[in-house]
Image: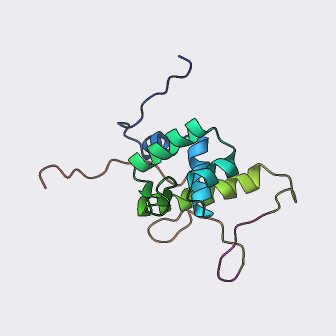
Amino acid sequence: MKGRKTNLEGADCGIARSLQIVGDWWTLLIVRDAFRGHQRFGEFQKNLGLAKNILSARLKKLVQEGIFTIEVHTNSPSSPRYILTPKGEKLYTLLVALWQWGEENCFEPGELETEMVDTIDGAPIERLQVKAADGRLLGPRDFRLASRPSSVGA
């Protein structure tokens, strides 16, 4: 049915459960803007050009999921700040991975005018890599899913 979403919160898959929380493109753009320093509703709305009702719904869900916390100051109670929690800050790896994938696959050479750089020395950040526990680089066919050892009766 059109407009009806499948609920993935009970799925036995880390990707599916993650998408249940951050799978909407506006949601990840809100989180991206939080990493850029935006904290107030108006800042997100102005930067994204997102309808207020959609932004409000996404921020509410991100607060409920523990990605953001709300800080209300007595001098501006009508303009709370949305602050990334430690759980929300862990999304930086996902955003870097999406940026790097997009950089490689969605732009013509020379088209992208910005790059991710280290705040200390301004050097471009290294490409993300997946590594085995022993440090070996793993490619897309070098891993599989396996059952975790059972903790029942332990």
Q: Position of residue 109 (x, y in %)?
A: 87, 57
Span shown in magenta: 114-121
Residue at image location 75% in from the left, 55% down from the top: 104
Which residue appears at 85% of the width and 52% of the height? 108
The residue at the far top in this view is 1
Quadrant of residue 125 within the rendered picture: bottom right
Task: Relative to 115, say whether 44 is above or below.
Answer: above
Whether the magenta-drawn stretch holds residue 115 is answered as yes
As rendered, which of 88 and 136 lies closer to the eye?
Answer: 88
Residue 96 falls within the magenta-colored stretch: no
Q: Residue at x 66, y 71 (%)?
A: 126
Q: Is residue 147 left or right of residue 111?
A: left
Residue 16 percent across, percent down from the top left: 46, 40
Q: Mainly helix, strand or loop, the magenta region? A: loop
Residue located 53% across and 68% down the image: 136
In the rendered image, the residue lying farthest to the left is: 153
Q: Is residue 111 above or below residue 147?
A: below
Instruction: Say which of 58 and 16 sits in front.
Output: 58
Q: Is residue 139 visible?
A: no
Judge whether 57 appears above or below 146 on screen: above
Answer above or below: position of 107 versus 76.
above
**Residue 131 location (% of width, % of height):** 52, 65
Residue 37 coordinates in the image, percent (x, y):
60, 64
Residue extending farthest right: 110
Foreground of the two, 97 or 52: 52
Image quarter where the C terminus lies is bottom left
Q: How many marks?
A: 0
Q: Residue furthest bottom?
A: 121
- Residue 148 visible in image: yes
